[in-house]
Image (cartoon, rainbow, N blue to C red):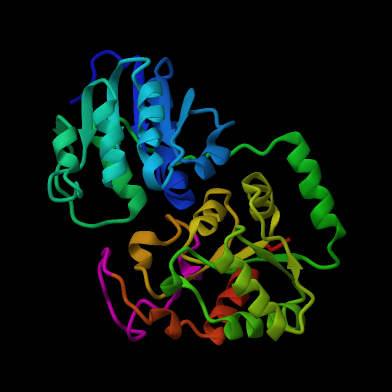
Amino acid sequence: MRFHVPPSEICVVMLSALGDAVHVLPVLNALKRAWPSSRITWVVQPVPYLLARDHPAPDRLVVFHRRKGPGAWRSFLDAGRQLRERRFDLLIALQVYAKAGVLTALARADLKLGFDRARARDLNWLVTNERIGARPVQHVQDQYFEFLQHLGVDPEPVEWRIPIHDDEREAQRQFFQDLDRPACGVVVGTSKPEKNWAPERYARMLDALESDFGMRPVLLGGPTTVEREMAVDILARTDARVVDMLGDDIRRLVWLLEGAPLVISPDTGPLHLARALDTPVVGLYGYTNPKRYGPYRKYQELVVDGYARSPDEIYPASMAYRPGGMSRVTVDAVLEKVALARNRYSLR
């Protein structure tokens, strides 16, 4: 469907983690460019909320606080109550998991646009009344753009527009000024163990970043037990003087990623955030397919491709996982990409 008159109220349902939230931002920006008078509500979870709360595109954020156990139903009631405060002309169901389907069902909208039946997992096709056409598997960002194309909205130019405020700029300036060398942000863990790189390889890489490239490694990531345990293991194995900046401050993570000359990361939210901030990022891929989940349109030449079972393997974008693929990501291959980044991008 193409709107002859811009929709007054739009709702976007995407509750997932940081990486998916980064992919939503170009969709919201394109909607605002096409329909500047439209009011956009975005249904998010608490961590992406911290990224989106000051963003210029969404006019309203409905935060879904997911609870576990007997009180889980209250999460849906609270969010559903906020959604039902207004009626939407258009709801875009970007997420296909059951919890998103429940909220899509609770919202009042004339048009609920979702994925085609084959891709609408967890019976999500039952809660939408219009669906985009079937497409082959492609990059997640392009998959989200299918909704814009269905609506006749141009996704170009692709913009993230993540704001950094004056006080954050000052904290950023002070942090990097106090370092004795150019920083290299190093993301140490993900929510899926299969996507994580071996601590001993991280340690050897950190040693080389300091001794061979003259950089100061800065550990980046969240506050989870997995990330902290990874960091402790890595730090015990390296002689490099590493700055540990793991923590639960998403806004700090933004300005650290934006200010670092280079970032090295497995497939996780900070990698996509670094790309959105236009920071060169060396991506470590083995378990997930970089043609679907890699940095979008830029820094693809910096991907270390352990997903390929051999250097000459040609494979399409797919959602298939390859257990054990991270073992094919070698320290030497990562350092080759660091050298490439240094030569291709003027690392400050």
Q: Is residue 234 magenta?
A: no
Query: In the rendered view of the protein, which quadrant contains the N terminus?
Result: top left
Q: Position of residue 11 (x, y in %)?
A: 35, 27
Query: In the rendered view of the protein, which quadrant contains the C terminus?
Result: bottom right
Identified at 34% across, 68% down, the residue is 289
Image quadrant of residue 87?
top left
Query: Which sits in the foreground, 2 or 195?
Result: 195
Figure disc tally: 0
Identified at 39% across, 38% down, the residue is 156
Q: Is residue 90 above or below residue 312?
A: above
Q: Is residue 54 above or below residue 278?
A: above
Q: Position of residue 235 (x, y in %)?
A: 70, 78
Magenta stretch bounds: 299-320
Image quadrant of residue 137?
bottom left
Q: Position of residue 29 (x, y in %)?
A: 45, 32
Query: Which sits in the foreground, 143 or 200?
Result: 200
Chief SS of the magenta region: loop
